Image: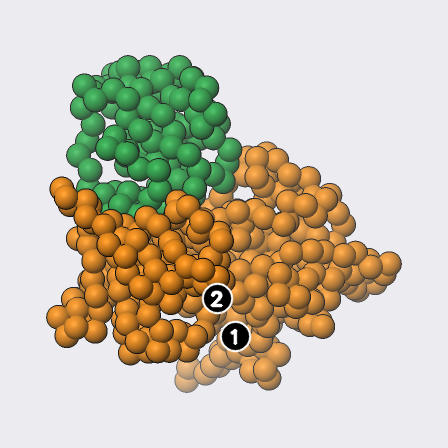
């Protein structure tokens, strides 16, 4: 049984949203943001989740929560993205798992 | 003025397949796309990625899907206005439309089909102060005519395929080519990376990595860029250049279509999905990823279906007095505007004695 988890997402306007996320639907953070419509359609997940557009860039605010390691394609895409910080990740490359309970992220500006 | 039966805005898979379905109805098509090549996202963002949900193709590369569609529609001789963005639309008294691009090219058609996907692709601009000031005065985001760079000092920024490919190409054209990228690794195709390394070793390309361009300078035209190395020392130096080409990919924007008086919801155009994917303006249809209706799925295969039904409605609009009887291609064959004819071979009748 995979439990739902709680995630806090700050949208591009600075508004905080506490959302409940399923962990048994093969869903990633980009898809979670889209399902709650926290960013306008067409401004997030443009490439559909292939790590090829960086429209789902977000900043990880809870470094203590372990996330999957960055793969080459994500790292390469981030190296070409704008507004990147040390804690930048691509939401589409982070699958939701029960271990991510309490994760806090902030969406990077649209570019 | 370009005249056609169905003017298609967007040359992605849905737009391309529309040409085929229209062709079966003897309707001619012309396509406008902001990108310099047909294929839309499939060609621009992920040509080398596989797609697994095209019916009867267990696996097909996005680029191959586009090539196949181009082959399939060839007999129907579609026209293309590429590298131009559809900007304005005007409805004439007779109910037909004139669509004008950002370059002023005019198109006249009784039916407009918007197959614009997520919108037209606009270059992503790096965050450099004064960048806008030098646009077209030493800064260009797309290379249209490589000859423009002959005997000039060029600096390219970026780490993807287009940055690598243009470096390789311009190495033989420009006086000097410098490639600046934020890291040592490149995202492009392996053979392009190898070729750049080879040209670097030959001294034909200056490669500066990991580094960023952080400032621009010049009186009335760009004269130099400030490059900051991303190493510990963060050393900075000015590089004299004539032209700077930032190649950081493209991002889609719905753009001017949003101002055409169409009903828009969540960055997509609302259509009547119970009938023919027509918008709130009769004669303008929206098909593929650009439209929305209850239960909409942004899938290529759904775009194909929408295009097919839309063409039937377009036919009735263009020929209100005619009645079209649908014929299977296996029965009726495919007769191209180029005079070609494809048809199923006749069965061989042979007696058994």
Q: Quadrant of the C terminus of chain B?
A: bottom left
Chain A palette colour: green
Q: Residue at x 79, y 56 (%)?
A: B91
Chain B palette colour: orange
Question: Does B296 sit above or below residue B104?
Answer: above
Which callout, 2 or 1, points at the residue further toward the start of the chain?
2
Q: Is A57 positioned to the left or the right of B340 in the image?
A: left
Chain for numbered disc 2 = B
Question: Does B274 sit above or below residue B183?
Answer: above
Could you say where residue A94 lies in the image, as x and y percent from the top left? Answer: 27, 32
**Residue extending farthest front:** B219
Residue at numbered disc 2: B36
Q: Residue at x 51, y 33 (%)?
A: A40
Give whichever of B27, B232 is nearer the camera. B232
Q: Is B20 positioned to the left or the right of A25 in the image?
A: right
Circle 2 Cα neighbour tier, 10 Å, few/some/many (<14 / 14–19 / ≥20): some
SS label for mark 2: loop
Question: Does B38 sit above or below residue A111?
Answer: below
Question: Does B308 sit above or below residue B344?
Answer: above
Could you say where residue A111 lies in the image, as x and y percent from the top left? Answer: 43, 42
The label shown at residue B74 is 1
């Amino acid at each position: 049984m995979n439990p739902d988890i709680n995630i806090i997402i700050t949208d591009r306007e600075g508004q905080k949203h506490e959302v409940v996320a399923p962990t048994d639907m093969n869903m990633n953070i980009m898809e979670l943001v889209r399902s709650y419509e926290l960013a306008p359609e067409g401004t997030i997940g443009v490439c559909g989740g292939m790590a090829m557009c960086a429209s789902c860039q977000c900043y990880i605010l809870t470094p203590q929560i372990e996330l999957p390691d960055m793969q080459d394609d994500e790292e390469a895409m981030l190296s070409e993205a704008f507004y990147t910080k040390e804690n930048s990740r691509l939401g589409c490359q982070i699958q939701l798992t029960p271990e991510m309970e309490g994760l806090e992220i902030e969406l990077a500006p649209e570019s | 003025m370009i005249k056609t039966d169905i003017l298609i805005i967007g040359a992605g898979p849905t737009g391309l397949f529309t040409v085929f379905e229209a062709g079966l109805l003897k309707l001619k098509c012309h396509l406008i796309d902001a990108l310099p090549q047909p294929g839309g996202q499939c060609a621009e963002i992920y040509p080398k990625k596989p797609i697994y949900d095209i019916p009867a193709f267990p696996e097909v590369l996005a680029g191959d899907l586009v090539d196949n569609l181009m082959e399939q529609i060839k007999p129907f001789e579609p026209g293309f206005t590429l590298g131009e963005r559809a900007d304005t639309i005007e409805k004439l008294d007779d109910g037909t439309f004139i669509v004008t691009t950002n370059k002023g090219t005019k198109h006249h058609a009784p039916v407009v089909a918007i197959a614009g996907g997520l919108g037209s692709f606009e270059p992503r601009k790096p965050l450099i102060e004064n960048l806008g000031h030098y646009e077209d005065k030493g800064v260009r985001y797309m290379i249209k005519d490589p000859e423009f760079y002959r005997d000039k000092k060029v600096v390219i920024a970026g780490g993807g395929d287009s940055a690598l490919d243009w470096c390789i190409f311009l190495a033989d054209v420009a006086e000097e080519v410098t490639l600046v990228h934020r890291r040592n690794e490149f995202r492009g195709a392996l053979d392009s990376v190898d070729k750049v390394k080879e040209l670097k070793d030959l001294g034909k390309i200056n490669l500066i990595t990991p580094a960023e361009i952080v400032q621009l300078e010049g009186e009335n035209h760009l004269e130099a860029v400030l490059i900051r190395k991303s190493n510990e020392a963060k050393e900075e130096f000015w590089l004299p250049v004539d032209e700077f080409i930032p190649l950081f990919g493209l991002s889609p924007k719905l753009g001017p279509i949003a101002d055409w008086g169409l009903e828009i919801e969540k960055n997509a155009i609302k259509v009547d999905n119970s009938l023919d994917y027509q918008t709130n303006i009769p004669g303008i249809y929206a098909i593929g990823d650009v439209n929305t209706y209850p239960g909409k799925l942004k899938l290529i295969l759904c775009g194909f279906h929408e295009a097919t039904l839309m063409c039937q409605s377009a036919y009735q609009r263009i020929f209100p007095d005619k009645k079209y009887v649908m014929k299977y291609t296996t029965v009726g064959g495919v007769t191209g505007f180029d005079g070609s004819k494809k048809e199923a071979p006749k069965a061989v009748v042979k007696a058994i004695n």
